[in-house]
Image (cartoon, helix red, strand yellow):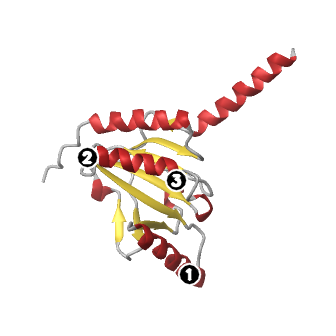
Amino acid sequence: MTRRAALLAVIVALSAATLAHAQLVEPPSEAGDFSLEETSGQTRTLSSVRGRVVIVFYEDRDHTSVNHAFKETLHRFVIDNHLQQQTTTYAIADVHGIDGIVRDMARGAIRTIASRYGIQILLDWDGVMRRAPFSLRGSEANVALIDRQGRMRWRHAGAVGEAERTSFFRTFRQLLREPAPAPAAP
């Protein structure tokens, strides 16, 4: 194998590995639900926002700034296109495995961050988001899209690069065009 061919093979392998992190979930995973505590003490569920496209940021404390620019771009996109009534964004802290007095300290620190930004942050103490149907990765920055029926449709672990950003917005726009589910019969 020539040196050029070997280099090309390495580039292709690295590109494939990078793209493997961002994925359309096909077929969409079954409708899931979660019930997570938020920093205010209330409980939030995924089922309470059925009919909206849900954007999930699932991160531990070491990865909250990984996708900062992407978060700002997305926020601006939602505001500029008047999508607040069609979408919900959940910031979920990966606090799986934190117990005892450390849990109270973590809750207080996260509450301070949430207050600084004027948002609520959900707390995943039990690793709910790591399990199916969500299957997000622990100890990484995760971004996910959940459709109006509550099905996982796109997810990515790690920094959102240009290819992932393009894939995200393509999927996001598609989900916004899909009809909301019909109300359940009484």
Of circles 1 and 3, which is in front?
A: 3
What is the CA distance from the residue labelled 1 to the residue labelled 2? 37 Å
The tag earlier along the polypeptide, 1 or 2, is 2
Q: Residues within 10 Å of mark 3 (few under 14, many from 20)?
A: few
Residue holding disc 1: 105
Q: Secondary structure at mark 2?
A: loop
Residue holding disc 2: 82
Q: Which of these two is toward me, 130 or 55?
A: 55
Looking at numbered disc 3 in the image, what kind of residue is underneath it? His
Confirm or deny contact between disc 2 and disc 3 (CB under 8 A): no
> Compared with residue 134, is residue 13 higher up or lower down, i.e. above or below?
above
> Compared with residue 114, is residue 175 higher up or lower down, i.e. above or below?
above
Q: Secondary structure at mark 1?
A: helix
The tag earlier along the polypeptide, 1 or 3, is 3
Looking at numbered disc 2 in the image, what kind of residue is underneath it? His
Q: Residues within 10 Å of mark 1 (few under 14, many from 20)?
A: few
Residue 175 position in % (x across, y down): 33, 37
Residue 32 position in % (x across, y down): 39, 51
Q: Secondary structure at mark 3?
A: helix
Looking at numbered disc 1 in the image, what kind of residue is underneath it? Met
Q: In the rendered structure, find residue 68 and report the number of the disc placed on it.
A: 3
Q: Residue at x 39, y 66 (%)?
A: 119
For this view, does 52 lie left or right of residue 117?
left
What is the CA distance from the residue labelled 1 to the residue labelled 3? 24 Å
Quadrant occupied by the C terminus: bottom left
For this view, does 95 lie left or right of residue 151?
right
Q: Residues within 10 Å of mark 2 (few under 14, many from 20)?
A: few
